[in-house]
Image (cartoon, coloured by chain):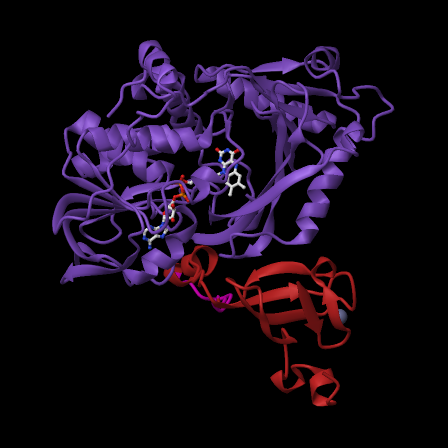
Chain colours: A purple, B red
């Protein structure tokens, strides 16, 4: 496999870029593995990478029903941040942020991580107080956070009207400068190449259709490409969690699947160089390196596995965009798409051993799991290798709901569509 | 997506408010069975296919409805009043109007 360096880029450029090798093999599945990971999304691939790199476990297969990156890892709006309120979340997402900061170097793959900042706008005094509280909570745990005044915000985002005449006047904002964006496909490809190079088999077009069992114990999977045995079977299927767990006989989960849509405009000249979120509704936007404005809002709000959205939310997101930036009214939308999110009952993820012997579970990412990709893989690999959680994911158990230990950053209660 | 309200007929989904999973059964308020309460609050079937759910026609007659909707296709196969006689599933249907 090719290492990327200034020299290899130049040498290949001079040869017309015809000699690049595929970044990962296309192996047929073996009859058995030490670890099978179901789901070739960012989290499954990162898990395989860290299993090999941190724990020396390389007899591993990642089984992906479609093509690599066809799930949420290739559908998200690429925002990466660690601006949470509750300590369990802050510690976990900050661990992720630290891995992001070194990821391109670690993978020898440019994931285009760009610390352009993430700014949450406040439009009411109560909201501003709430952001001050969250910023203080972050700084207590060593995460960067700063409050910004309207004048500072105006300098950062000249297109934003911060005057009293605005439809929703801006009273200030909470900024995390180290937050930003990353190229989501490159994250999947980089982890895939890194895992493959350490011996992991990445098997695409291989759908898991059931589980092999010995009594209660999971001993492998049945797939569209035959039965495969494994000592340990890890599930990391994001929006498909409900379906896959039902294949294992787990009928109910603290999860609902919901569709989230995203949008991108035609390319513009540089318009905004940070991620901005709108506090009067649910809207967020950044600009991609190609120039398109990438933005989104709420989930559609009812259970769905459709991987496409419905029009009312399109309408809603466009109105919020124009409330914030009326000047974008004549910019054309290029594409929109949907992804299926596994919304949990408290808005926080689940990374755990079980629930069946031989099984390991990674789910409940809601619509915020892209930023978690490195830490999710890192913690899940630790949990699989050692049969116990790392302290960073110890609070994210499956039984926390029944034990009254929910991690509800937004305080919305057991109402997945509000998280 | 259109939902056919038994009172008002087919209306755009924007007139309705989703009120969640209708598969759950609320325990008797006097019940002290913690497992039953936990299951009611946190556990979901989350099927890929037909799903029983509550919607309110909040922008219309304000009735609470029980709807069966396919979560893969958004196809709606039944709409009934959330409470009461299921024979009233669709007045229009009963009157042969649909
Ligand atoms: C529109 C949108 C915008 C988002 N924006 C952001 C954002 O800005 N920031 C952020 O942090 N997060 C965001 N998210 C959330 C984030 O993308 C997800 O939480 C995260 O990517 C989920 O983890 P994953 O990458 O492993 O999932 P996926 O990429 O979905 O991986 C799961 C994989 O499992 C496979 N699979 C499913 N069933 C089977 C089976 N039976 N057999 C084999 N394989 C199977 C699927 O095909 C899929 O490839 C967004 C999500 C969406 C949909
Ligand atoms: Zn009605």
Q: Which residues are magenta?
A: B24-33
The quadrant in which the N terminus of chain A is found is: top left
- Which residue is located at x 32 percent, y 17 percent? A4
- Where is residue A377, by image quadrant? top left
Q: Quadrant of ligand 1?
A: top left
Q: Classify A252 as above or below A153.
A: below
Q: Name the residue furthest bottom.
A: B95
* Residue B88 located left or right of residue A69: right
The quadrant in which the C terminus of chain A is found is: top right
* Residue A165 located left or right of residue A157: right
Q: Position of residue A69 (x, y in %)?
A: 40, 40
Residue A344 makes an appearance in the image: no
Majority secondary structure of magenta residues: loop
- Where is residue A324, by image quadrant? top right
For the image, the number of numbered tags is 0
- Front residue of A259/A133: it is A259
- Which residue is located at x 54 percent, y 34 percent? A77
- Front residue of A314/B41: it is A314
- Where is residue A56, by image quadrant? top left
- Which residue is located at x 43 percent, y 49 percent? A239
Q: Name the residue furthest front.
A: A15
């Amino acid at each position: 496999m090719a290492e990327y360096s200034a020299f290899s880029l130049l040498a290949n450029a001079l040869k017309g870029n015809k000699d690049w090798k595929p970044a990962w093999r296309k192996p047929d599945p073996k009859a058995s593995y030490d670890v099978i990971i179901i789901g070739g999304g960012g989290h499954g691939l990162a898990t395989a990478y860290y299993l090999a790199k941190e724990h020396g476990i390389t007899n591993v297969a990642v089984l992906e029903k479609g093509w690599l990156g066809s799930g949420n890892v290739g559908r998200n709006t690429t925002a990466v941040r660690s601006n949470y309120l509750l300590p369990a979340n802050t510690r976990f997402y900050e661990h992720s942020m630290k891995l992001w900061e070194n990821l391109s170097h670690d993978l020898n793959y440019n994931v285009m991580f760009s610390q352009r900042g993430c700014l949450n706008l406040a439009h009411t005094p109560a909201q501003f107080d709430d952001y001050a509280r969250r910023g203080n909570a972050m700084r207590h745990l060593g995460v960067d956070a700063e409050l910004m005044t309207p004048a500072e915000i105006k300098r950062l985002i000249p297109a934003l009207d911060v005057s009293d005449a605005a439809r929703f006047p801006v009273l200030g904002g909470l900024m995390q400068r180290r937050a930003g964006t990353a190229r989501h496909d490159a994250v999947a490809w980089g982890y895939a190449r890194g895992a493959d190079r350490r011996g992991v088999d990445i098997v695409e077009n291989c759908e898991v259709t059931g589980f092999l069992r010995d009594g209660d114990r999971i001993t492998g999977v049945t797939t569209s490409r035959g039965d495969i045995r494994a000592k340990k079977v890890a599930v990391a299927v994001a929006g498909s969690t409900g379906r896959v767990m039902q294949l294992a006989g787990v009928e109910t989960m603290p999860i609902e699947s919901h569709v989230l849509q995203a949008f991108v405009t035609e390319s513009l000249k540089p318009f905004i160089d940070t991620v901005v979120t709108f506090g009067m509704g649910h809207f967020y936007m950044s600009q991609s390196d190609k120039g398109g404005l990438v933005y989104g809002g709420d989930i559609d709000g009812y259970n769905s596995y459709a991987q496409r959205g419905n029009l009312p939310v399109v309408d809603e997101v466009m109105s919020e965009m124009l409330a914030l930036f009326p000047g974008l009214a004549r910019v054309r939308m290029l594409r929109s798409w949907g992804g299926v999110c596994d919304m949990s009952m408290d808005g926080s993820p689940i990374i755990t051993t079980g629930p069946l012997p031989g099984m390991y579970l990674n789910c409940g990412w809601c619509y915020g799991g892209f930023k978690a990709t490195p830490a999710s893989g890192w913690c899940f690999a630790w949990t699989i290798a050692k049969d116990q959680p790392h302290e960073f994911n110890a609070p994210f158990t499956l039984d926390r709901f029944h034990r009254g230990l929910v991690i509800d950053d937004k305080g919305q209660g057991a109402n997945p569509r509000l998280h | 997506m259109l939902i056919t309200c038994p009172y008002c007929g087919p209306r755009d989904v924007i007139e309705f408010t989703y009120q969640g999973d209708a598969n759950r059964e609320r325990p008797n308020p006097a019940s002290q069975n913690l497992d039953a309460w936990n299951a009611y609050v946190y556990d979901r079937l989350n099927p890929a296919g037909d799903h029983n759910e509550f919607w309110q026609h909040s922008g219309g007659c304000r009735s609470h409805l029980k709807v069966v909707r396919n979560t893969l296709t958004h196809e709606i196969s039944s709409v009934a009043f959330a409470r009461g006689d299921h024979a009233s599933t669709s007045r229009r249907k009963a009157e042969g109007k649909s």
